[in-house]
Amino acid sequence: DAGITQSPRHKVTETGTPVTLRCHQTENHRYMYWYRQDPGHGLRLIHYSYGVKDTDKGEVSDGYSVSRSKTEDFLLTLESATSSQTSVYFCAISESGRDEQYFGPGTRLTVT
Amino acid sequence: EDKVVQSPLSLVVHEGDTVTLNCSYEVTNFRSLLWYKQEKKAPTFLFMLTSSGIEKKSGRLSSILDKKELFSILNITATQTGDSAIYLCASEDSGTYKYIFGTGTRLKVLA
């Protein structure tokens, strides 16, 4: 299995609080992605990174920000969590951006 | 707007049956189509297709791409209960390094 971990694995938080999810990889892959998965929507891209300090928006980026200060870590921040951000969040990595993605175990986030 | 559509949304079969899952795509800068299997946790990679008409095969699973008609199929023969999962397809946009996922097909195989 690709070396990808996500933390925390589960989190319950209140509306309006900031939340940061972490993705850590040991594969030295250049590309990293954050997705959310909701029933009826499949996987939707939030943000992705194509190198240290290089990031771009996905289709559902509103309310989220990311940072990548080193190759192995990609952070997803919800500045002020809302109930609509209750979801399962997956991190993924890709070596070239042109090949298969390997997914982390996911983080289940509940915003009450 | 780029999109990937999978059908059927869900499917229930009995062990030993053969199933065909469909994925159609409309992607401006299409480069490849990927299939993933998702059981209880993270999606795991099955196939990546870039050329029309060339079948990719792994055991009882196979997949093919039609770039003229803009679709792919995933076949599973002699299904087993362990094949029960959500099957996702995704298309890569070559201009942006983004992958667009379909909503998935939920397959249930009954013993």
Image: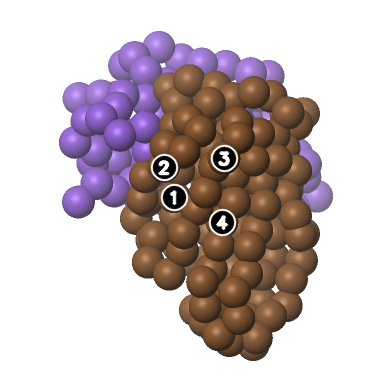
Residue A77 spot, x, y in % from top left: 55, 62
| Same-chain status of marks 2 and 3 | yes
Q: For residue A47, which numbered disc appears in the image?
A: 1
Q: Label 3 near label 2: C-beta < 8 Å?
A: no
Q: Which chain is brown?
A: A
- Tell me how far mark 3 sits from mark 1, CA to CA: 15 Å
Report which colour depicts chain B.
purple
- Disc 1 marks a residue whose amino acid type is His
Q: SS class of the residue under badge 3?
A: strand
Q: Residue B14 versus residue A68: which sits nearer the camera?
A: A68
Tell me the residue at 75%/43% (across/down): A5
State how far apart marks 3 and 4 are (Cα): 12 Å
User: In terms of depth relative to the viewer, which is nearer, B76 or A76?
Assistant: A76
Callout 1–callout 2 Cβ contact below 8 Å: yes
What is the CA distance from the residue labelled 1 to the residue labelled 2? 7 Å
Chain for disc number 2: A
User: Is A52 on the left or on the right of B29, as rendered?
Assistant: right
Between disc 3 and disc 1, whose residue precedes?
1
The x, y position of residue A6, in whole percent, is: 72, 49
Q: What amino acid does circle 4 point to?
A: Leu
Q: Are marks 3 and 1 in contact (CB under 8 Å)?
A: no
| Quadrant position of the C terminus of chain A in the picture | bottom right
Which chain does the residue under circle 4 lie in?
A
Whichever of labels 3 and 4 marks the residue nearer the N terminus, that label is 3
Q: CA distance from mark 2 to mark 3?
A: 11 Å
Label annotation for residue A76:
4
Q: Which residue is label 2 attached to?
A: A55
- Mark 1 in CB contact with mark 4 (< 8 angstroms): yes
Of labels 3 and 4, the one closer to you: 3
Same-chain status of marks 4 and 2:
yes
